[in-house]
Image: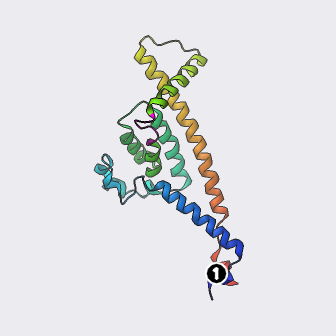
């Protein structure tokens, strides 16, 4: 008996939509580090063996992905250009977060985008400091560093929250459209 003959049309549509979602997710995750390609990343290759031994780094459960989104976006928006990958890797190890997601968030700030992102974070931090009534810091460098850090923390938490909600909605939608093969094969 052929499975396609016994499967209702709506089940085929559900399977086709699920297949499209999985393909889209795989295309999105392709440039990110995986167990097999970890040795190709310049900084991460030194820690490849350590990362391969920890399965939670590769888990896409809600807990691991949520931690990776929040911590990843906070690290992304902190003015720590050059050491973001190392900090993200250390955070993924210590907090048991998903490594591909936390590394993917680090790719948001690169040489092309940081010139727009960091001044915006500085303005956001200045507004927050002004709202809280915290006066100017005496040194110009200190003022920029503090306001950019405050803006980065707020923006990172906000963006982490937004992407966490999106991921949880997508995760629950994927769970709802689960196909019960036992029921299909009984018919």
Which secondary structure type mostly characterizes the magenta part of the structure? loop
Asked which quadrant contains residue 15, the reply is bottom right
Q: Residue furthest top?
A: 138
* Lateral position of residue 65 relative to residue 55, left or right: right
- Image quadrant holding the N terminus, namely bottom right
Please report the bounds of the magenta region as a residue range: 106-113
Q: Residue 125 in magenta? A: no
Total label count? 1
Task: Tell me the residue at 64%/81% (across/down).
Answer: 4
Q: Residue furthest front?
A: 112
Asked which quadrant contains residue 38, the reply is bottom left
What is the crowding at mark 1: few (fewer than 14 residues within 10 Å), some, or many (at least 20)? few
- Image quadrant holding the C terminus, namely bottom right
**Callout 1: helix, strand or loop?**
helix
- Colour option used: rainbow
Residue 70 screen position, x and y as percent: 52, 41
Residue 6 screen position, x and y as percent: 68, 83
Task: Tell me the residue at 66%/58% (across/down).
Answer: 173
Task: Tell me the residue at 53%/57% (across/down).
Answer: 25
- The residue carrying mark 1 is 4
User: Which of these two is toward me, 24 or 48?
Assistant: 24
User: Which of these two is toward me, 60 or 25?
Assistant: 25
Residue 31 screen position, x and y as percent: 42, 53
* Lateral position of residue 8 relative to residue 34, left or right: right
Q: Residue furthest left?
A: 46
Residue 141 screen position, x and y as percent: 40, 17
């Amino acid at each position: 008996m052929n499975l396609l003959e016994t499967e209702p049309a709506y089940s085929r549509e559900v399977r086709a939509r699920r297949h499209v979602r999985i393909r889209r997710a795989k295309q999105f995750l392709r440039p990110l580090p995986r167990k097999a390609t970890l040795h190709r990343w310049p900084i991460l290759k030194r820690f490849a063996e350590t990362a391969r031994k920890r399965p939670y780094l590769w888990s896409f459960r809600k807990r691991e992905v949520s931690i990776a989104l929040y911590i990843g976006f906070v690290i992304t928006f902190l003015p720590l250009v050059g050491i973001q990958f190392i900090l993200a890797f250390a955070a993924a190890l210590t907090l048991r977060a998903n490594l591909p997601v936390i590394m993917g968030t680090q790719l948001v700030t690169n040489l092309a985008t940081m010139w727009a992102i960091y001044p915006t974070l500085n303005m956001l931090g200045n507004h927050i400091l002004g709202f809280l009534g915290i006066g100017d810091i005496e040194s110009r460098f200190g003022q920029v560093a503090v306001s950019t850090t405050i803006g980065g923390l707020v923006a990172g938490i906000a963006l982490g929250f937004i992407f966490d909600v999106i991921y949880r909605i997508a995760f629950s939608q994927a769970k709802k459209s689960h196909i019960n093969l036992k029921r299909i094969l009984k018919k």
